[in-house]
Image (cartoon, rainbow, N blue to C red):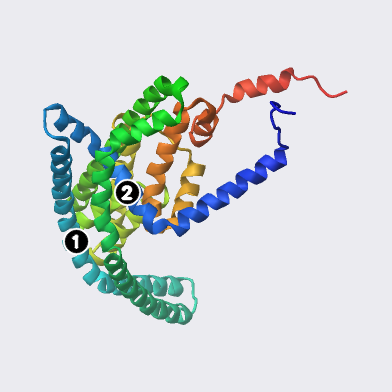
Amino acid sequence: MPGEELKLPFYVKVTIFLMGLIAFFAIMYIAKSIIIPLVFAIIIAILLHPVVNFLVRIKINRVLAIILTMLLAFIVIAAVGAVLISQASRFGESWPALVGKFTSILNQTISDAADYFDKDPQKIHDWITKTQGEIVNVSTAAIGQTIVLLGNGLVILLLIPFYIFMILFYQPLLIEFIRRLSGSNYQTHVRELVSQIKTVIQRYLVGLVIEAALMATMNTAALLILGIEYAFILGILAALLNVIPYIGGIIAVALPMMVALVTKPSPWYAFYILVAYYIIQLIDNHYIVPYIVASKIKINALFSVIVVLVGNALWGIPGMFLSMPMLAIIKLICDHIEPLKPWGFLLGDTMPPILKIKTILKKRKPLQ
């Protein structure tokens, strides 16, 4: 009958949802060369937008304000990049030697353990010798592949500034498009909603940058105090890996511990690094994240790990770094749109009150 609402069975709705999800991830994977720089550009544009607005408010032409803001950002990124490249170059050249020293230490440790437990260590030694060559070869090949990928991606990277400029320039047009898309009856509500989401996302991303800077400073200072080589690259790398939950933290502390084991006379330095990074992580969790990064944006551990694995499967290493900021933005949007609030609750780490659930179960009458 005309005017009657079409009601689909539950299994049809689930099938449509799953097909749409598969199609979405397929598009994200196929078009990753287009989507990855665009996502980076959107995040950077959101970060730079308050600076552009400030320059516009002091009567600077909008185009000139965007150019000045991007130039300032480029100078900061270039300065940090120059330090990273110089340190990474030294670290890359020393990597085979570090692997060799680490393998020798591991070899000696296994020999001592084998003598203590009266076991034949020869098979283990043969395996270590074989593995050592494979690690060096794989590492060298990985460095070469990284250089090739950087060369191939140079054109894409050059598109990012263009994307950023266009997003910042057409930002009023994009916002107005979202308002008009909602219909005339909801334009006021959508205007307020878009403004709130934009403000919270900007605060979150700015807080994330400040957190990374503070973490890099503390990590580097701790490594310099302990006299660990390559302190700058290891400290900054640890701050970047901190964006990747759980997995990133393990890699971040493992690298300097390995360097300490092969460059310091005592293995206690590796333990000191573990303690220092643990203290820094406590400071981050209890002070930096709650007060600098938006305290309301908390993702539970289950979806944190899932989204990192999905990001790696879809987009590789860039996907791992982009996964958490993108998931946080999605959660923010869900938290501010009424029909999507259950999804925002699912992504968060707020547990429902267990006591109330027990009370409800007690009140239910037993089956006759």
In x, y percent, where is residue 65? 15, 37
- Residue beneath the point at 45% across and 50% down: 308
Residue 174 or residue 150, whichever sits in front: 174
Task: Using the image, tell me which numbered label, if any, was put on residue 334.
Answer: none
In x, y percent, where is residue 106? 37, 70
Q: Secondary structure at mark 1?
A: helix
**How many labels sit on residues?**
2
With respect to residue 203, does 75 lie above or below? Answer: below
Q: Residue furthest left?
A: 59
* Label 1 CA crowd tier, 10 Å (few <14, some 14–19, many 20+): few
Q: Which residue is mark 1?
A: 85
Q: Secondary structure at mark 2?
A: helix
- Residue beneath the point at 31% across and 59% down: 255
Q: Which residue is mark 2?
A: 40
With respect to residue 235, does 279 lie above or below? Answer: above
Question: Mark 2 or 1 closer to N-term?
Answer: 2
Q: Are marks 2 and 1 in contact (CB under 8 Å)?
A: no
